[in-house]
Image (tube, grey):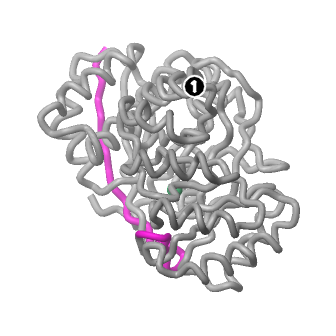
């Protein structure tokens, strides 16, 4: 059975200025991958520059020339070996991730089953939390976004503005969010904008915050440990985990391990990360790209939730048919009768955004 890989990159402008504590953006690039074999097509994607697509064409596709779509872990391993001299973290990991998901989808479609069923369902519905609350939004925008997402029951806003130098505004925005959310759960994400001492001091002023994501840089393992030990909120990290050893380093210093199927090495590596977390009595939470995570999340016993990220929810609705609709109480319930992950690419709708 011969395997054919193809890719394209699309750049989608944001619906306004977007920013967090340590980064600002006005567009998101998505690299879409199709894997074809025996008359079926598998679909995967990653949020990464077009360089990830070029890497697929130059290094990954040749490495998979003799691969069988039914042996995804072998294909994943072949891709990891093919990029040895390049280094895995970053672009290479995103490229591997997109192909790995496309191969899992292809395998499920060839078997005529839902991907969640192929992996093994452990939950009917997957909880999500609303994620947005950019530092670039004014109070009116933040309040209306929170109000629109009250039914989800959990919402995360960005803090740590301007590398942690606007503490007063951070606290004011947290206060606003706390008032709008009422009894619902409030999460914050500093994207590594604070120092450890600053994060601990500020957390002492937070009104009932359940989740404190990347209070310090994820490279600062000692800082994460110090904040985790000192604050009430769950300290979390993992969105820059590009391989299993990275998660092995993070797991001992966080309360919940985050992982991103579009970065960590695909569903193959997600399952290993989940097992690693389970061995430490930790839950995993999916970072961004909600439509890409639904099936592996439904197959993960120690899942906490998925991030229903503002920008990616927009793009996934625009680019894909079959996206699981947001259900009551902030849940995604995959249609187990649909083949693969249930998604198909809307090529004509995406075409105006194509950049490579
Ligand atoms: Mg984050």
Provide residue 32's location: percent of width, then percent of height: 39, 47
**Magenta stretch encompasses residue 197:** no
The picture quadrant where one finds residue 157 is bottom right
Q: Is residue 162 visible?
A: yes
Count of numbered labels shown in the rendering: 1
The picture quadrant where one finds residue 310 is bottom right
**Magenta stretch encompasses residue 6:** yes
Q: Which residue, as the protein is rendered here, is positioned at the far left? A: 85
Q: Secondary structure at mark 1?
A: loop
Near mark 1 (Cα within 10 A), the count class, few <14, some 14-19 or many ≥20, is few
Majority SS type along the magenta span: strand
Q: Is residue 343 visible?
A: no
150 left or right of 194? right
Is disc 1's CB within 8 Å of ligand 1?
no
Looking at the image, which residue is at 68% across and 21% down? 121
Q: Which residues are magenta?
A: 1-22
Above/below status of 72 relative to 20: above
Provide residue 196's location: percent of width, then percent of height: 48, 59
Q: Which residue, as the protein is rendered here, is positioned at the far right? A: 183
Front residue of this view, candidates 210 and 59:
210
176 left or right of 95? right
Above/below status of 90 relative to 338: below
17 left or right of 74? right
Looking at the image, which residue is at 76% across and 29% down? 124
236 left or right of 303? left
């Amino acid at each position: 059975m011969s395997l054919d890989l193809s890719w394209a990159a699309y750049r989608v402008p944001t619906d306004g200025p977007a920013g967090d504590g340590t980064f600002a953006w006005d567009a998101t690039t998505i690299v879409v991958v199709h894997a074809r074999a025996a008359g079926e097509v598998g679909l995967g994607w990653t949020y990464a520059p077009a360089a990830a697509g070029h890497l697929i064409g130059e290094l990954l596709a040749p490495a998979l020339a003799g691969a069988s779509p039914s042996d995804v872990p072998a294909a994943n391993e072949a891709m990891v070996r093919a990029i040895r001299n390049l280094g895995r973290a970053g672009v290479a990991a995103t490229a591997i991730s997109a192909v790995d998901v496309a191969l899992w989808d292809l395998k499920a479609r060839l078997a005529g089953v839902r991907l969640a069923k192929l992996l093994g369902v452990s939950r009917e519905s997957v909880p999500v939390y609303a994620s947005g609350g950019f530092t670039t939004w004014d109070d009116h925008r933040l309040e209306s976004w929170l109000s629109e997402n009250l039914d989800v029951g959990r919402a995360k806003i960005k803090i740590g503005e301007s590398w942690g130098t606007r503490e007063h505004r951070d606290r004011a925005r947290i206060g606003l969010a706390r008032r709008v959310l009422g009894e619902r759960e409030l999460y914050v994400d500093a994207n590594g904008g604070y120092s450890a001492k600053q994060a601990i001091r500020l957390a002492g002023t937070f009104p009932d915050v359940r989740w404190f994501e990347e209070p310090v840089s994820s490279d600062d393992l000692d800082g994460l440990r110090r904040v985790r030990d000192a604050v009430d909120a769950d300290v979390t990290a993992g969105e820059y985990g590009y391989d299993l050893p990275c998660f092995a380093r993070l797991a001992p210093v966080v309360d919940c391990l985050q992982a991103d199927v579009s970065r960590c090495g695909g569903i193959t590596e997600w399952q290993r990360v989940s097992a690693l977390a389970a061995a430490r009595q930790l839950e995993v939470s999916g970072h961004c790209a909600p439509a890409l995570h639904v099936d592996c999340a439904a197959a993960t016993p120690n899942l906490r939730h998925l991030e229903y990220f503002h920008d990616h929810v927009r793009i996934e609705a625009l680019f894909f048919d079959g996206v699981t609709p947001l259900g009551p109480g902030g849940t995604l319930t995959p249609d187990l009768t649909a083949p693969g992950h249930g998604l198909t690419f809307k090529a004509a709708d995406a075409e105006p955004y194509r950049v490579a």
